[in-house]
Image: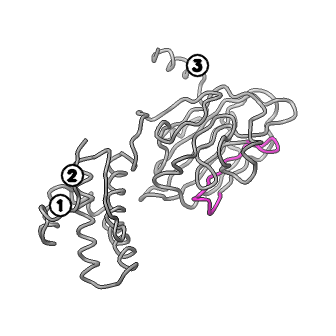
Amino acid sequence: MAWFRGHEDVERLAPTLVGCVEFVRTRLSPAELAGRAGEFARMAAWTAARVSQRGDYYIANAYRGQLLYALVRHHRPMTILEIGTGRGYSTLAMALALVDAGIAGRPELITGTSQMLYPAMRRLGENAVLNLKNKSHSVTAEVVVPDGGAQGVIVAQGGALGGWSLYTKHGMPRYCYNLLGLQRFTITGTAPLPAGSHQIRAEFAYDGGGLGRGGEVRLYVDGQRVGSGRVDSTEAYTYSFDETTDVGCETGTAVSDDYRAPDSRFNGAIDWVRLEAGLDGHDHLIDPEHLTRIAMTRQ
């Protein structure tokens, strides 16, 4: 763990704006700095507007934010303690650096680009689940649909104030993305699932170009596309500190307003759920034998 006291380092390393600029240039490549120039300007303008629009404050704010960003990118600390957030610009700059450093604003216990989940795995904290934010990803589940049609949650992360859910309603597969409890984007399949074993997959093609951007969601059943739709914006950092990831139901509040959490239990069987960061973009179907080979190599 790298530890530094932000304001003391600011004063020691960059007592002037010129010194601040020089320090940033020694820690960030021109491409890295140019790629975030717009973000720094927007954050500086927003936080300055909370108090005043004085030019001197705006300029100092922007450069010192870049310094803190460079410090965090350079040291990659797992923990940052900021005493007094002031107008919030330094907090935003350091949070942005954590994401760009691959830490995503929180410690992660899962490594790699995929994770398997199984029935009855519930109340999984956000740090114990593969981070799918700010990137393209897919969620695939193999389920058995009972006679009479499927109903209920297959897998969900988060709750009423933010998250996503892959579920079925009136027999049809659905995906819901909940943006901060303010807006819900729901993509629905075109036909009910017949009884039997099926693979349901949601692919999220992230727009890129920054944090919290949107993307296109495509639904597949047994490798065949059955629905698509847009998610205009996403949450960049954390869905919730107390909501969790659940397989087969929701144990907290409901991500979607299509169901109530107490009544969300899936009425069929769930064999497995696979989370993947990145899209293979080929047949949209996972070979169960391939998953078995992966599992055997990890014994």
Kindly state the secondary structure of the residue where label 2 is placed: loop
- Left or right of 116 in this view: 5: left
Is 170 magenta? The answer is yes
Q: Earlier in the sequence, mark 3 or mark 2?
A: 2
Return the residue found at the far front. Answer: 83
- 132 relative to 111, above or below: below
Where is residue 238 shown, x and y percent of the image?
48, 51
Q: Please, what is the three-letter code of the amino acid marked with disc 2? A: Phe
Verify CB contact (< 8 Å) between mark 2 and mark 1: yes
Judged by depth in the image, the label closer to the viewer, 3 or 2, is 2
Q: Residues within 10 Å of mark 2 (few under 14, many from 20)?
A: some
Q: Earlier in the sequence, mark 3 or mark 1?
A: 1
Where is residue 42 shown, x and y percent of the image?
38, 71
The residue identified by callout 2 is 4
Q: Please, what is the three-letter code of the amino acid marked with disc 1? A: Glu
Quadrant assignment for the N terminus: top left
Total labels drawn: 3
Residue 289 numbered mark, or none = 3
Q: Residue placed at 41% from the left, 33% from the top? A: 111
Q: Residue placed at 60% from the left, 56% from the top? A: 161
The residue identified by callout 1 is 8
Q: Residues within 10 Å of mark 1 (few under 14, many from 20)?
A: few
Colour setting: one colour
Q: Main secondary structure of the magenta part?
A: strand
Query: Magenta stretch?
Result: 168-184
